[in-house]
Amino acid sequence: MSMEQALMKLSALLIAALLSISSAAAFAHSGGTDSKGCHRNHKTNDYHCH
């Protein structure tokens, strides 16, 4: 394997790792959901579904 191929492989792995981490953070929030997949934000009194 050439040095260029190794760097391309490493770059692809780093990009995949960063996308995985940022995707998980985007969907996470505190608070449970009801049977419909919804919940109420008690600070704003907003009810929304995911």
Image (tube, rainbow, N blue to C red):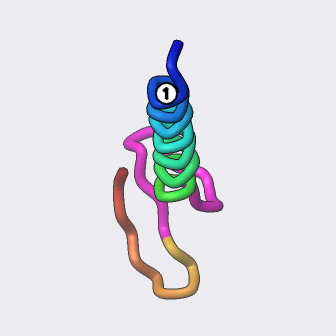
Magenta stretch? 28-40
Residue shown at the point (60%, 52%) measured from the top left: 32
Q: Residue furthest right?
A: 30
For residue 18: magenta?
Answer: no
Residue 11 to residue 40: above or below: above
Residue shown at the point (46%, 82%) measured from the top left: 45
Q: How many marks?
A: 1
The one of 14 and 5 positioned closer to us in this rendering: 5
Question: In this image, 43 relative to 19: left or right?
Answer: right
Whole-percent x, y for residue 50 in the image: 36, 51
Whole-percent x, y for residue 5 in the image: 46, 24
Residue 47 to residue 29: above or below: below
Residue 9 to residue 1: above or below: below
Question: In this image, 25 relative to 47: left or right?
Answer: right
Assess disc 1: are there few (<14), some (14-19) or many (≥20) residues with their C-alpha within 10 Å of its C-alpha. Answer: few
Q: Amino acid at mark 1?
A: Lys
Residue shown at the point (39%, 69%) measured from the top left: 47
Residue shown at the point (62%, 59%) measured from the top left: 31
Majority secondary structure in the magenta region:
loop
Residue linked to disc 1: 9
Whole-percent x, y for residue 20 in the image: 52, 41
The one of 29 and 41 positioned closer to us in this rendering: 29
